[in-house]
Amino acid sequence: MTAWSQHSDINSFLKPSDTLNISRRNTVLITEASLATLTLVGLNQLWYADYPKSKFHTLNDNEEWLQMDKLGHVFSSYQLGRVGADVLNWSGVSKKNQLIYGATLGFGFLTVVEVFDGFSQEWGFSWGDMAANAAGTGLYVGQELLWKEQRIVLKYSFHRTQYAAQRPDKLGSGLTEEFLKDYNGQTYWLSFNMSSFFKDSKIPKWLNIALGYGADGMLTGTNTHLSNYDRGRQYYLSLDVDLTRIKTNSHVLKTLFSVFNTIKIPFPALEINEKNGVKLHAVYF
């Protein structure tokens, strides 16, 4: 088989079905159920098993980490819901069912994780986390109902900071862990596609304007004696690219663009923070 024919086969496989493809739908459902089960079992055995159990209890952690952890929940719920809807679209499932059974994937999965937290002495069931999970799902579903497209995409960017080395147990040890745990280096973005709001304009279809939120100076969830730094919020304005709006007939490229569209494209950025006022970044990650 030639490289071209292999590419053609992959391209054909990745092309969404125009009508319900029962084989694809069943594959999606079985795969999702299997991955969710394995992940939850893995979390229970490899993560929660290291901490003592307790009776189910709630925890108010809304003031911790300057709400960066809550934005992480919004982001996770939004992206998992987007993937859930996309794979059902690939299966030819109706738009209504994509939203009911696909876009709610993130909310459902993260709810189970939150219940695990409720039975762990170390943490607790957080209504703030649940509200954030609902917000992420709502951001996706609401846009599909209102506009039938994602005009505002939730994205993520990260840069390494000095803080992780001081508390690697909480903020991560090494790039992979820090990427997930170090809230000081994380930025969450609402990326607005300009051409979708101004339909008759000549603005490039892929050009976005992004509003970002971050924070730094955090060694702990709240201000304690462990922190010698001033904690502060950061607000950003930057450009971005909606990769999914780049024209191509290749479903391989469309799939790759969809995957990488979760990450904010590095661009110059204007920062406004609580410590130093205004700061300009030549390129911001």
Image (tube, rainbow, N blue to C red):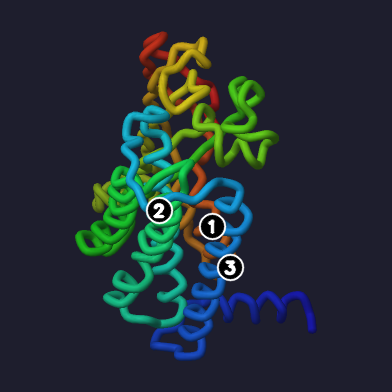
Which residue matches tag 3? 38
Sequence-wise first label, 3 or 2: 3
Residue drawn where x is 40% and y is 23% of the image: 234
Which residue matches tag 1? 259
Q: Secondary structure at mark 2?
A: helix
Compared across the picture, whether 253 is left or right of 94 comes to: right
Q: Which residue is most to the left?
A: 146
Badge 1 amino acid:
Val
| Visible residue check, residue 193 | no
Compared across the picture, whether 140 is left or right of 187 comes to: left
Given residues 137 and 20, the one toward you in this image is 137
Residue drawn where x is 46% and y is 72% of the image: 87
Give the quarter of the image for residue 232. Answer: top left
User: Is residue 85 shown above or below 217?
Assistant: below
Q: Which residue is most to the bottom?
A: 22
Image coordinates for residue 263, horizontal then vertical, percent: 51, 45
Sequence-wise first label, 1 or 3: 3
Disc 2 to disc 1: CB gap under 8 Å: no
Quadrant where the image shows the N terminus: bottom right
Image coordinates for residue 51, horizontal then vertical, percent: 56, 46
Sequence-wise first label, 2 or 1: 2
Q: Secondary structure at mark 1?
A: helix
| Nearer the camera: disc 1 or disc 3 | 3
Which residue matches tag 2? 114
